Amino acid sequence: MYSVRMRATKDEMHISGAERLVDEKNIKIAAVSMIERALSHDRGKPDFINISVEEIETPIKEITSLPINLVNVNSVEEGKKVAKKVLSHIGIPYLCVEKAFTLLENGPSDGENMRGAIVMDMKGERLEPDKRRGIRASHMDITPIASLLLADALSKKGLTRHFTHVKEALVLATKVAFTKGSIAELCWSDDPFYTTGYVASGKLGYVRIPHLKKEGDYRGGRVFFVDNVNITDYIEEIEKTPVLITKFDGLREISDLNNITGE
Ligand code: PML
C-alpha cells in the first residue's frame, strides 16, 4: 500500500489538501485526481502543489467508521449550543469547552487558523508542541465499498453535494476517535463558504451540526480533547499509523438531542 498526499497553497496560504491509501496500480489515478482537485478549488488557483507518494510498511489498522448523527439547527447560536451540550455530555469540562470555542472563533495561532489541530487536555492546557502547525491526522482512507454506502446514506438525506467534505471529515474523526487517549473532537471548517462542523467521539459518534459559524467567516479548525496521553506517542499515532475504514456504521437523523445524550 502507498500513501498518496496532496497539498496546494497560494502565497503560502492553504488552498486544499487530500490523501488516499492505495495499491501501487492506483497511485497514478489518485495523483491525477488530486491535481485536478487542487486546480479547481473554489478558494482559488494554487501557485504550489505538492504530491507525495510514500510506501506504507507498517500494518494497516482496519476499523469501522463512527456512526453519523445528523442534528438539525437553524442558527449558529443554536449550533454552538448543541455542540457544547454534546461535549459536556461526553464529559469535557466546561472550561475546556469554552476555551476551545474561543480559540477556534478567534484564530488559535495569533489570530490565524492553524494548519493542524489543537490538542487539549482535561485542564484546558494545549499540548501540541508547535502552536502554528498543530498536529495533522494523516495516513488514512476509506474503502470504495464503505464509501459507496456513505454516499448512498447521504443521498437519501439530500446531502450528496457534501459527500467529499463529509467523507474526509468522517475518516479523520474516526481515526482520531480510535486513537488511545482521545475523548472527543470539535471541528468546523476553515472554508468561508462551509459552515458545517461536528463533535465526534467514541461515545456519541459523529454528531454533524450544520451551522457552527456564519457564512464568509474564514476561521475554523479542530480541537482534539485528550486525557492521560503521552503527547509524543499520541502525535506519532495520529500522524503516522495507517488506518483504513472498511465499514460504514450508518447515519441517522436526530430530532431530539436527548435521544443521543440519553437525557
Ligand atoms: C461535514 O460533515 O460536512 C464536514 C464538516 C467539517 C469539515 C471540515 C473541513 O472540511 O475543513
Image (spheres, rainbow, N blue to C red):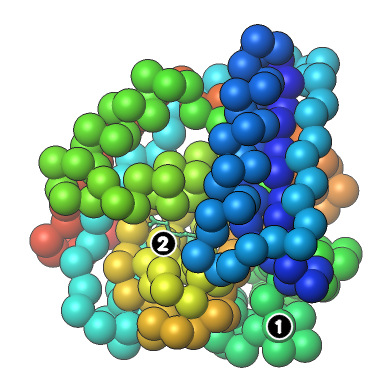
Q: Quadrant of residue 199?
A: bottom left
| 75 in relation to 135, above or below | below
Report the amino acid beneath label 1: Glu
Q: Which sits earlier in the primary sequence, circle 1 or circle 2? A: 1
Question: What residue would you read off at disc 1?
Answer: 112
Q: Residue at x 45, y 84 (%)?
A: 216
Q: In the picture, which quadrant includes the C terminus?
A: bottom left
Apparent side of residue 217 relative to residue 230 in the rendered image (left or right):
left
The circle on residue 239 is none
Q: Which residue is mark 2?
A: 198
Locate residue 79, reporting x and y percent: 31, 77
For label 2, the crowd category at 10 Å Cα-Cα, with few meaning under 14, some 14 to 19 and many 20 or more, is many
> In front of the other: label 1 or label 2?
1
Residue situated in front as seen by the camera: 212 or 66 = 212
**Percent position of residue 45, x then y:** 64, 63
User: Taking the image as drawn, is residue 13 in sight?
Assistant: yes
Instruction: Identify the residue shown where x is 47% and y is 22%.
Output: 143
User: Which quadrant of the view contains residue 14?
Assistant: bottom right
Q: Residue at x 88, y 64 (%)?
A: 129
Task: Determine whether the residue tagged by mark 2 lies in a helix, strand or loop.
Answer: strand
Is residue 168 found left or right of 35 in the rendered image? left
Mark 2 vs ligand 1: CB below 8 Å? yes
Residue 147 occupies quadrant: top left
